[in-house]
């Protein structure tokens, strides 16, 4: 009887993963051939401020009201959360690297220098204009991803919408590859409703706040301390930006803590082995998530089985000022692409154990905000005319967030 029960659960789980493979929306957005199931993986995760589902249909007004998300025309199709997850060949410790959405970078395919989150929206707008007969109306440069097809009657046509968001995904992938130096092998995006639905499907996500929150803009009301969020509270937790002392960098920390908690839930306590939870999760992912068409979810799940709950480290690329004046985009976050690529390589090596961790008393560890400002301050001090002045103190060290110990955030 026990053997039969185990066999039945295993068969159900296998069927559910196969259903997930077939039911999840997919898009052909990765140019290179998909790597083998045990090869190195670089997965781009996007949280898109979109008011449509993966099939291109508008989210119901009742859902938008519950999520405090405004109307169907709000949002602007920007990528509000950009994370690259590196999984080493054969599994092992994964590194998740966040890119601030307002990072001022060179966009791919001739779109110029802009905030990185606009790579998605600019390609979406250009492709929509191309398919609806308004070619060039957005003022964007010609994109090689703009489909050559007969104009559609409306920009709200689901087929137009699907083609536009695929173009947005490709543009973002190319831009992130150029910035980080990593070859993106897989892609996943989730819309607004997805954060709420996934958190409910796995029974909530543990988080911790340093202080109580009452934010009328996002609708978030939570006490201080450890707690579990799900549904609309989970979405508000990762979306809040008003009232945070560190601005968007604090919001990134919120997103990392949320993902750390969700990862811990998924990789422990047999969540993925529970057929009922897996059934709920399959339905949610099918409604809210878009994957690249070459992603074999079953093979990836097999690879991730050896990843313990604590074996994911979350880091953020080094940044300069967050008040960089730009010609068209207002204030942006300053980044140095060369420094970002070095940081990414060092962070992956550090998390994989290729290099030993630096001594905290002498070197600022990889993964800390302010690395560039600290080195710049030291250089300025050394080159100054007053040789007796003490060197500038190092930037404060903030340990990276891990799935095993996310810690509390603002």
Image (cartoon, rainbow, N blue to C red):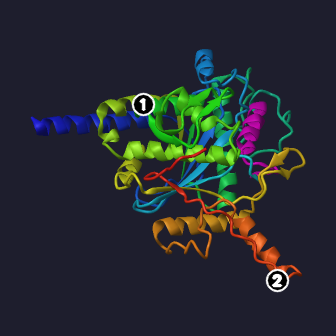
Observer-nearest residue: 390 or 154?
A: 390
Residue 209 drawn at (x, y percent): 55, 41
Find residue 336 and report its image quarter.
Answer: bottom right
Left or right of 267? Residue 149 is right
Point 78% across, 70% down: residue: 377
> Residue 130 occupies which quadrant of the picture?
top right
Q: Earlier in the sequence, mark 1 or mark 2?
A: 1
> Would you say 129 lies left or right of 281 here?
right
Mark drawn on residue 62: none
Q: Is residue 339 visible?
A: yes
Task: Please report the residue visible at 35 percent of the width from the left and 32 percent of the height from the top.
Answer: 277
The residue at the point 46 percent across, 44 percent down is 261
Where does label 1 land, which residue? 201
User: Residue 317: which quarter of the image?
Assistant: bottom right
* Quadrant (top left, top right, bottom left, bottom right) of the C terminus: top right
Magenta span: 106-130
Please tell me which residue is depicted at 34% across the width and 40% down the height of the picture. Answer: 272
Decide: few, some or many residues near mark 2? Use Cα within 10 Å; few <14, some 14-19, many ≥20. Answer: few
C-alpha distance separating marks 1 and 2 = 61 Å
Residue nearer the viewer, 339 or 110: 339
Identify the residue position indicated by label 2 in the image: 388
Q: Nearer the viewer, mark 1 or mark 2?
A: 2
Left of 331 or right of it: where is 48? left
Tags 1 and 2 in contact by the CB under 8 Å rule? no
- Check the image and name the residue furthest to the top: 62
Query: How packed is label 1: few (under 14 Cα within 10 Å), some, or many (20 or more)?
Result: many
Q: Quadrant of the N terminus?
A: top left
Q: Is residue 46 above or below residue 177?
A: above
Q: Position of residue 74 (x, y in %)?
A: 72, 26
Q: Position of residue 398 (x, y in %)?
A: 59, 59
- Residue 77 location (% of width, % of height): 70, 34
């Amino acid at each position: 009887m026990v053997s039969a029960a185990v066999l039945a659960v295993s068969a159900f789980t296998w069927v559910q993963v196969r259903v997930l493979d077939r039911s999840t929306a997919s898009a052909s957005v990765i140019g290179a051939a998909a790597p083998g199931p045990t090869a190195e993986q670089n997965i781009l995760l996007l949280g898109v401020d979109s008011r449509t589902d993966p099939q291109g249909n508008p989210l119901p007004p009742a859902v938008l009201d519950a999520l405090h998300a405004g109307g169907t025309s709000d949002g602007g199709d920007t990528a509000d959360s950009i994370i690259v997850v590196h999984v080493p060949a054969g599994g092992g410790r994964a590194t998740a690297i966040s890119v601030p959405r307002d990072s001022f970078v060179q966009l791919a395919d001739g779109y110029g220098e802009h905030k990185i989150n606009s790579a998605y929206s600019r390609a979406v707008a250009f492709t929509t204009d191309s398919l609806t007969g308004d070619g060039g109306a957005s003022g964007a440069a010609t994109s090689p991803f703009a489909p050559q097809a007969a104009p559609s009657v409306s920009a709200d046509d689901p087929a137009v919408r699907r083609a536009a968001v695929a173009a947005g995904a490709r543009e973002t992938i190319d831009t992130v590859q150029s910035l980080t130096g990593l070859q993106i092998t897989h892609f996943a995006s989730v819309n607004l409703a997805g954060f709420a639905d996934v958190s409910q499907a796995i029974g909530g996500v543990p988080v911790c706040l340093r202080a109580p929150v009452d934010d009328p803009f996002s609708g978030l009301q939570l006490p201080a301390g450890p707690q579990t969020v799900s549904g609309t509270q989970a979405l508000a937790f990762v979306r809040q930006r008003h009232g945070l002392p560190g601005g968007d960098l604090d919001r990134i920390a919120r997103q990392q803590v949320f993902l750390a908690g969700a990862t811990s839930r998924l990789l422990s306590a047999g969540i993925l082995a529970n057929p009922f939870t897996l059934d709920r999760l399959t339905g949610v992912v099918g409604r809210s998530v878009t994957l690249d068409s070459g992603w074999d979810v079953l093979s990836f799940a097999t690879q991730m089985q050896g990843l313990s709950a604590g074996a994911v480290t979350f880091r953020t690329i080094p940044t300069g000022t967050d008040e960089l004046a730009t010609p068209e985009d207002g204030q942006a976050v300053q980044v140095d692409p060369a420094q970002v690529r070095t940081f990414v390589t060092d962070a992956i090596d550090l998390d994989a154990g290729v290099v030993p961790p630096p001594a905290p008393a002498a070197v600022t560890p990889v993964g800390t905000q302010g690395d560039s400002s600290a080195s710049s301050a030291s250089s300025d001090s050394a080159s100054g005319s007053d040789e007796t002045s003490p060197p500038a103190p190092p930037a404060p060290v903030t340990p990276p967030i891990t799935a095993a110990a996310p810690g509390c955030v603002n």
